[in-house]
Image: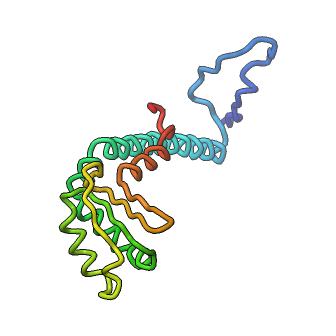
Amino acid sequence: MIEPEPFYFEDFSRDTSSPVLDLSVNKIMPEELSNTRLLSDISKKLQMLLTERKAHEIAMIKAVLSEIAPVLAEKCGNEIIEDFLRRRFSQLISKQNLNFYVHPDNLEMLCRLLKNLCPDDKKSRFEVHGDFDMQHSECRIVWNGGEEIYSTSQILDKIREQLKGITDND
C-alpha cells in the first residue's frame, strides 16, 4: 500500500506566475497540523460569536438606560435621594449653613431623614427648600463656599457617554 504524502497549498501549483484558487476540500495533512488548524478555526469562530454577543448585550444595556432608567429614577426619586444623603451626610454635616433643595414632593422625606441623621446640636445649621425645577431624583446641597448636585440624569448621561461608540450602530 502506498502512503499518501502530505498535500499543502504551495504544492498545488508548480507554476507560481499565475494565482491559483484552491478549491480542494479533501487535503491530506499530518494529524497534528489538522488538529492545530481545527483548534484555530474553532477559536476564531468563538471570538466572533463572543464579539457579536457582547455587542448585543451592550445594545440591551443602552436600551434600558434610554427607556427604563429615567422612568425608574423619576418613580423612585425619594429612595434615590435618601440613599445618596445617607451615604454623604457624614461628610456634609461639617459644612456651614447647609441648604438642601429637592422637588417639593420629596420635602417630607428629606425633613424626616435629616431629623434622623443630624445630631440635635447641629439641626439649626441646615434649611430645606422645595424647588419645582428639580426632578424627583435630584438633590442640590449648597453651603458656605460650595455646592453639590446629585442628579440621576447626569449619571445616566455619563454612562451613555462611556458606552458611546462601543457598538457599531451608534
Number of callouts in the render? 0
Where is residue 4, by image quadrant?
top right
Where is residue 160, by image quadrant?
top left
Name the spot of residue 66 as percent of width and height, x first. 33, 42
Q: Quick check: 99 above or below 11?
A: below
Residue at point 70% right, 27% down?
9
Residue at point 29% right, 56% down?
137
Name the spot of residue 17 as percent of width and height, x first. 81, 12
146 relative to 102 in the view: left or right = right
Q: Quick check: 4 above or below 142?
A: above
Residue at point 44% right, 41% down?
55
Identify which residue, 120 or 6, lies in the foreground: 120
Q: Quadrant of the N terminus?
A: top right
Display coloring: rainbow
162 relative to 115 in the view: left or right = right
Residue at point 48% right, 44% down?
161
Name the spot of residue 64 as percent of width and height, x first. 31, 45
Name the spot of residue 21 as percent of width and height, x first. 65, 17
